[in-house]
Image: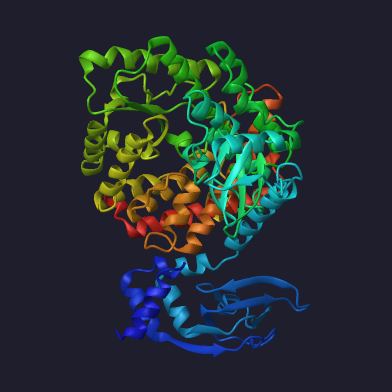
């Protein structure tokens, strides 16, 4: 194969459906293709004219227009056009026009037909479901837009924040804050942000330590603080400040300071919103108070959904609240049992680890202990601490894990070295129990204590997993067996009887399968991403899943998650326990169709996994 043909092959391998072709088939495709250059504005396929080739955009972009020149789609590199005339339609119903100078790879009708006969998935791929599901997901995202939640920071930021230079004396900085009645100063040089100093810094870093007030403010400032942009949203800023436990967020655009927002600014904006939950949790001093506050989380989420929050925003809110609850319980535990005898990190795994907590999620957690940990000397302390926290979470509404994957179980309290060794055994000997643990503990995120210990464990596990082909095959097998509730002719399959009769489970046969595939893609590419969305984004186009395939799964995940949250909100309103069992008859016609599309995506991507990995032999 020539260098040019090899480059084309590698290009095609990065996009669906060619990414799923067997290697021997893919090797033959470039040699059957011709290449043509189209100038910007040139008509590639007219309406009503027979078309004899399938086009794949090598570079540039092409608009698909209807007979009234209404834009239906814009396609860029890697996407195809011309399929409709490869099938039953003899002439093109659409007009394709180059909107940029474009190079197009062309495959003749005859060669396409031969390829499709040998690989039936080609025809299935080029059907209309992927476009419909993307439209459905986009519609849901647009419906998520509300004035309050999506107010851009640029609309209410303090545009000319008070600032000083790094050389300014602490005393002069304090005077400046007092004179202007502000609670923070941005420290900058020629408009470039260097740090921030707040009234809290003045108390804890200067007054409490009796520091010389003639020293430069750079000695007490927070260096390189987290920032947002003017295009950021109030909701995102609030979550970030809650997670980092800060109250001031500089606004930086194109490397230059453009303003600052504070938690008080956003609270005033959202004063009628139940966004105070995470702040309230950090102020509670008893388990009972924490439980009473956190139990309102479901109601908070329900209100956010009613106001148009997306599934990602609701999951983020629930996760930040759950993290805050666990952190506060750990603080109370340390007050009760004393200072920890060795450093440790409290880790959340599963959906909370992925920051995808739902309204029906239980708790999954663990402890990473310093390698100096000694069971005889330190075991009792950490057993008591873990029991206190897990029981506190349960009382607050994060029910105990049915599989006992919690820090209160001695099995999930390990030193750093023990955790790394455990991951090694799971990866090299993927037995059924090990695979169950892999699916939970690879979603591994430290939230309290020595976070670096958790990061070390997770990174070591990711490094070991990248080349573990045997484990990949087992994970692929598990993902491929999560059958979506879809029958012949795309009919939705519901439970026939029992408590959930006439319903289907959008988690078991839907989102859970996407989570599993995303985890596999991510581990196989060596990415340390933990969230499903981040994993799909990181793995896209890197040999495991094409960019198009990853985007289809993202759209399906967003749609199914939104449907689940809407269903759970209705259950909460009537006092029922939230679940994932939905009666399709309660959905509108379009939502039922989009549900079929989402399940079709999952089913097709599972088929691709079964082709890539020897799942039938496992």
Residue sitting at x 25%, y 50%? 468
Residue 524 % position (x, y): 33, 53
Residue 403 visible (yes or no): yes
Residue 472 % position (x, y): 30, 50
Residue lying at the far front of the rendered structure: 214
Q: Is residue 14 above or below residue 512?
A: below
The N terminus is located in which quarter?
A: bottom left
**Left or right: 383 in relation to 42:** left
Residue 165 % position (x, y): 56, 48
Q: Residue 87 sits in which quadrant? A: bottom right
The way the protein has been coloured in the rendering is rainbow
- Count of numbered circles on the image: 0
Residue 519 % position (x, y): 40, 47
Residue sitting at x 44%, y 60%? 540
Q: Is residue 401 above or below residue 443?
A: above
Q: Residue 288 sits in which quadrant? A: top right
Please name whichever residue, 340 or 194, is drawn nearer the observer in this view of the structure: 194
**Left or right: 217 in relation to 28:** right
Please name whichever residue, 213 or 47, is drawn nearer the observer in this view of the structure: 213
Residue sitting at x 37%, y 85%? 31
Residue 563 visible (yes or no): no
Residue sitting at x 70%, y 49%? 160
Q: Is residue 503 above or below residue 61?
A: above
């Amino acid at each position: 194969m020539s260098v040019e043909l090899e480059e084309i092959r590698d290009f095609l391998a990065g996009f669906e459906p060619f990414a799923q072709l067997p290697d021997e088939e893919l090797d033959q495709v470039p040699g059957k293709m011709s290449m043509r250059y189209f100038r910007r504005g040139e008509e590639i396929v007219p309406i009503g004219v027979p078309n004899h080739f399938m086009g794949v955009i090598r570079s540039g972009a092409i608009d698909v227009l209807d007979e009234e020149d209404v834009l239906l789609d814009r396609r860029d590199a890697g996407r195809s056009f011309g399929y409709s005339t490869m099938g039953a339609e003899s002439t093109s119903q659409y007009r394709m026009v180059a909107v940029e100078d474009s190079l197009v790879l062309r495959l003749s009708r005859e060669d396409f037909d031969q390829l499709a006969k040998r690989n039936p998935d080609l025809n299935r791929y080029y059907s209309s479901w992927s476009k419909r599901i993307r439209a459905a997901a986009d519609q849901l995202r647009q419906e998520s837009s509300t004035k309050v939640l999506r107010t851009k920071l640029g609309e209410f930021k303090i545009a000319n924040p008070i600032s000083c230079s790094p050389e300014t004396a602490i005393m002069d900085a304090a005077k400046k804050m007092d004179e202007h009645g502000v609670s923070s100063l941005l420290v900058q040089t020629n408009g470039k942000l260097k740090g921030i100093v707040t009234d809290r810094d003045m108390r804890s870093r200067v007054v409490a330590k009796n520091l010389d007030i003639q020293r430069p403010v750079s000695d007490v400032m927070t260096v390189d603080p987290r920032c947002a942009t003017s295009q950021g949203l109030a909701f995102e800023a609030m979550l970030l400040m809650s997670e980092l436990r800060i109250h001031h967020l500089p606004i930086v655009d194109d490397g230059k300071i453009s303003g600052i927002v504070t938690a008080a600014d956003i609270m005033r904006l959202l004063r009628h919103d139940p966004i105070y939950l995470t702040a309230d949790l950090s102020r509670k001093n008893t388990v009972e108070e924490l439980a009473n506050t956190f139990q309102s989380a479901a109601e908070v989420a329900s209100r956010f959904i009613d106001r148009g929050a997306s599934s990602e925003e609701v999951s983020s809110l629930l996760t930040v609240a759950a993290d805050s609850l666990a952190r506060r319980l750990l603080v109370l535990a340390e007050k009760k049992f004393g200072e920890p005898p060795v450093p440790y990190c409290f880790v959340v795994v599963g959906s909370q680890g992925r920051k995808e907590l739902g309204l029906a999620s239980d708790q999954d957690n663990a402890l990473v202990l310093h390698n100096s940990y000694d069971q005889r000397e330190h075991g009792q302390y950490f057993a008591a601490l873990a029991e206190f926290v897990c029981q506190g979470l349960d009382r607050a509404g994060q029910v105990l894990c049915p599989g006992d994957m919690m820090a209160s179980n001695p099995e999930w309290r390990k030193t750093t070295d023990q955790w790394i060794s455990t991951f090694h055994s799971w990866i090299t000997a993927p037995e059924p129990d090990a695979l169950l643990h892999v699916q939970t503990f690879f979603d591994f995120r430290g939230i309290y204590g020595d976070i670096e210990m958790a990061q070390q464990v997770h990174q070591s596990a990711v490094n070991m997993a990248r080349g573990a082909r045997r484990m990949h095959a087992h994970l692929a097998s598990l993902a491929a067996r999560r059958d979506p509730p879809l029958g012949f002719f795309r009919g939705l399959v519901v439970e026939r009887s029992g408590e959930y009769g006439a319903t289907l489970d959008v988690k078991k046969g839907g989102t859970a399968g996407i989570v599993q595939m995303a985890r596999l893609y991510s581990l196989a590419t060596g990415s340390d991403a933990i969230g499903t969305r981040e994993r799909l984004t990181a793995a896209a186009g890197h040999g495991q899943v094409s960019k198009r395939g990853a985007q289809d799964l993202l759209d399906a995940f967003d749609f199914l998650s939104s449907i689940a949250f809407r269903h759970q909100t209705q259950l909460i309103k009537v006092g029922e326990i939230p679940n994932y069992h939905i009666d399709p008859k309660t959905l509108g016609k379009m939502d039922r169709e989009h549900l079929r599309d989402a399940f079709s995506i999952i089913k097709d991507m599972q088929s691709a996994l079964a082709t890539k990995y020897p799942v039938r032999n496992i």
